Image (tube, rainbow, N blue to C red):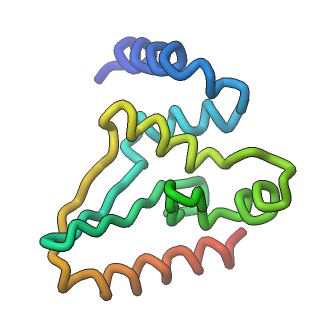
Amino acid sequence: MNQEERAAEKEELRRRFASLARHGSKFEKALETVMSGGVKESHFSPSGRALYSVVGTLGEEFIDPSKPYCSCSNFYFRVTSGKEETCYHLLGFQIASRTGKIDITEFDDEEFGQLIKAFFGDVFGVVSRS
């Protein structure tokens, strides 16, 4: 995709999700994250379990959109305290899920434990850097 097509796609997403623009720079970071393929689903078969993550500034963050929850420091310090409504990782998920832009990787159920271990190792690494 060239720069002109990328700019047009971003503008279309801005228009389509204008109601989220109230989040300012978080909205812009969420758009960039979605457009770069940073919203990910690890899907396990045959159980159908799914884990979600979003590639952020410091690394990959675990999210649970059903709660909502994010492992990022912004969520912990600002969202849970009521100072902010959400983080850009969860905004990115909202956009990606409504546009079909989630990068899905398939796994066997037998791989679940290994992936969880690796995933949380990454999350704790991000926490230690923030």
**Residue shown at the point (44%, 60%) measured from the top left:** 53
**Residue shown at the point (18%, 85%) measured from the top left:** 110
- Position of 63 with respect to 58 (left or right) is left
- 11 or 18, which is in the foreground? 18
Q: Number of callouts in the render?
A: 0
117 relative to 91, above or below: below
Residue 2 point in image, percent of width and height: 32, 19
**Residue shown at the point (41%, 49%) measured from the top left:** 39
- Position of 94 with respect to 29 (left or right) is left
- 127 or 88, which is in the foreground? 88
Q: Quadrant of the C terminus?
A: bottom right
Residue 121 point in image, percent of width and height: 49, 83
Which of the 4 image quadrants contains residue 73? bottom right
- Position of 62 with respect to 129 (left or right) is left
1 relative to 72, above or below: above
Q: Quadrant of the N terminus?
A: top left
111 relative to 40, above or below: below
Which of the 4 image quadrants contains residue 108? bottom left
Residue 11 point in image, percent of width and height: 49, 14
Residue 51 point in image, percent of width and height: 37, 66
31 relative to 10, above or below: below
**Residue shown at the point (39%, 12%) measured from the top left:** 4
